[in-house]
Image (cartoon, coloured by chain):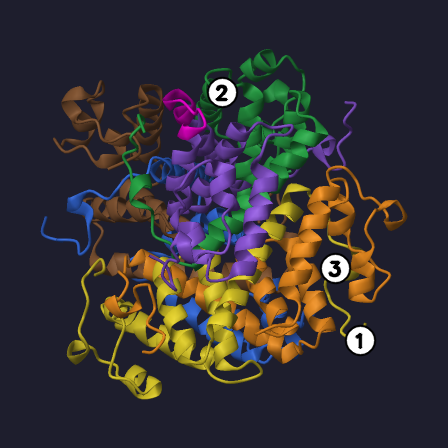
Chain colours: A blue, B brown, C orange, D yellow, E purple, F green
Amino acid sequence: MSTFGLIEYTDASDDDIMATRKTDYINNFWKAIAHDPALLKRTWEGLKAVMGPGALDPLTKELLYIAVSVTNNCNYCIASHTASAFSKGMTPEMFKELQQVVGMANATNKLVTGYQVSVDARYQPPLNLQK
Amino acid sequence: MSTFGLIEYTDASDDDIMATRKTDYINNFWKAIAHDPALLKRTWEGLKAVMGPGALDPLTKELLYIAVSVTNNCNYCIASHTASAFSKGMTPEMFKELQQVVGMANATNKLVTGYQVSVDARYQPPLNLQK
Amino acid sequence: MSTFGLIEYTDASDDDIMATRKTDYINNFWKAIAHDPALLKRTWEGLKAVMGPGALDPLTKELLYIAVSVTNNCNYCIASHTASAFSKGMTPEMFKELQQVVGMANATNKLVTGYQVSVDARYQPPLNLQK
Amino acid sequence: MSTFGLIEYTDASDDDIMATRKTDYINNFWKAIAHDPALLKRTWEGLKAVMGPGALDPLTKELLYIAVSVTNNCNYCIASHTASAFSKGMTPEMFKELQQVVGMANATNKLVTGYQVSVDARYQPPLNLQK
Amino acid sequence: MSTFGLIEYTDASDDDIMATRKTDYINNFWKAIAHDPALLKRTWEGLKAVMGPGALDPLTKELLYIAVSVTNNCNYCIASHTASAFSKGMTPEMFKELQQVVGMANATNKLVTGYQVSVDARYQPPLNLQK
Amino acid sequence: MSTFGLIEYTDASDDDIMATRKTDYINNFWKAIAHDPALLKRTWEGLKAVMGPGALDPLTKELLYIAVSVTNNCNYCIASHTASAFSKGMTPEMFKELQQVVGMANATNKLVTGYQVSVDARYQPPLNLQK
């Protein structure tokens, strides 16, 4: 369900999602934002460009998506991207290490903040990539 | 700088950080929390256990750390882990794709939330890993 | 439902909410915090002062409320203020543009943060309102 | 400054920003992400499409941008969009009401959450826009 | 500094802050929002009502303020409330335990979220305070 | 429920939780992360070390945990730690004051941020604990 309800696929104007993902299943997110075709188009094209293979492989990108979604506490996003990551090859062991990193990063983020730690001179941008 | 100031290494009780990282540089975070040796010990041991090689490689873990830190808006963490990721082999192109994923995930996290999209039945936990 | 349950209106000590809103419906938030009359009174008086007409009209203020609530991922707040905004004249088209802005702002907030962009000299406070 | 430094405009490949904004000033954000031309292009095109006039006017959209940026604690975004909003006609009185709404919304978001208030049946999506 | 600059005390309309706090120092927050006397008045009155002694003592309330401010990553708030807590009797050891709790809570918050753990039946609101 | 389902206690390898808490009830969080024994062990040992009596008493630590969890919008954590705090002696009046502080802190955090208030010189770290 969503604010305006869900538009089933036969009502939707865009099917590049199905073709690209090689699936006949469209998840609720797309059915929900299909009420705004401009948003649907821009979001899908952006996602397709960003999440494909590049310097980072698609599975690593899914792991990053989950890390962001957990930190943002977005339950829908966690559920759908966790499923997606498993379908792209994430093993249970990878899932567990991912959660460990996310938990640890959230802890140390707050320790740094609570102790008011200033950035070391050598980490100040711009980075010297030769260093 | 930090709330209690920084404890330079010769004052600190723990040097496994230097040995493990093969460096003589200790960054401000450790010098700041060195005022609480129990916290320093638990944090370092946790970080060492979590960030080493496993089902995910150390560089992927650094990328995840950055993704969390950006989402949490922790400037210190972003600066230090971006430097760390470059030292572990992150290329500029990988950095750019990482930022693209983080930006995209933050956008769609909020679209899902704003449209009040409910989780598809097939994504409800527990996951059927056979599917 | 809520931590202490909901206090129905006939039990509540305050009815300026009904009078101001010209409604006989009190939503769960007020019934939940009615367990703390001081909080109820301060919150309602604050909300009444803040959300009324002024330099910004009440509908714009509802849109801002939704933008904050989505960014904070507060499902109750999103549901109730989305309903409230529609009752104050938000059209579906306005809702859609609101979500687009919220999604875009969340994305660029994180790109700025991830790229560690420093504030341009001309944007540093205090603002020169003559500029 | 930024992770990779700033690319001055004469080095940048895109000048639709200047033309659209009727300015010869490019702010640091664009100079920072100019290291990733694909991101720059997608972000600019998205922003241009989203922030222009529509069902909501450009000033209202700037106010929403500020509300999100404050909630996300993005200092760069707050500084630049506050300046931008003033340039589009935000008065000091509008700024003040905006901050009041943002403060109030952040407070009640957390009261709702802390009291574990469940969504009223009538606010459950999908919304009945006739109601 | 702040968006509109700081209004020094001799320009401000409210001096109950000095009297209540038994100090002749007004911190920047109040000087910044003094541009909006209605906000200043409502905020100060709210803070005075909330932060005084009650079922929780003022120092515990300062600790809670810090915990929220660290989680929200509000540097100004962390700096000023950490100073305030020390002036109200927080010891360095209390500060350290506070940071440990904040770090731990942020970690487990995200582990719960990442593992998609549903609330135990016995913790569902409303709470049975007899249990 | 959780991503991998819940491991009932008779399957779990660690029972120090029951012994320390003097209970035969294990809540879902532990059953969920029991799929990762290393995480379970590290988390439990950390929590046990952090949440016990020290310079701050266990109830104060529960209040801090709730303050963080509300700010992070972690529903599971709010539900379980609210129950835990009541079991450790939190009264309804303490709960109410806690929520008031959390609401107020979230509001002023954002007012400070929105008004771009810079830190007073006297609050800059390191703190002079003699002052």
Tell me the residue that label 2 is attached to: F56
Tell me the residue that label 1 is attached to: D130
- Residue D25 place in picture, x, y as percent: 25, 79
Gap in angstroms between the C-alphas marked 2 and 3: 42 Å
Q: Is E69 on the left-hand or right-hand side of E61?
A: left
Q: Does the magenta stretch include residue B82?
A: no
- Residue B35 place in picture, x, y as percent: 29, 24
Q: What element carries label 2?
A: loop
Gap in angstroms between the C-alphas marked 1 and 2: 54 Å
Q: Nearer the viewer, residue B56 or E77?
A: E77
**Span shown in magenta:** E86-96
Q: Residue at x 38, y 46 (%)?
A: E76
Q: Which amino acid does label 1 sit on?
A: Gln
Give the crowd class for mark 3: few <14, some 14-19, many >=20 residues within 10 Å.
Answer: some
- Residue B69 place in picture, x, y as percent: 36, 47
Rendered image: mark on residue D124: 3
Q: Same subunit under labels 2 and 3?
A: no
Q: Is mark 3 on a helix, strand or loop?
A: loop
The answer to which quarter of the image holds residue F11 is: top right
Give the crowd class for mark 1: few <14, some 14-19, many >=20 residues within 10 Å.
Answer: few
State the count of labels: 3
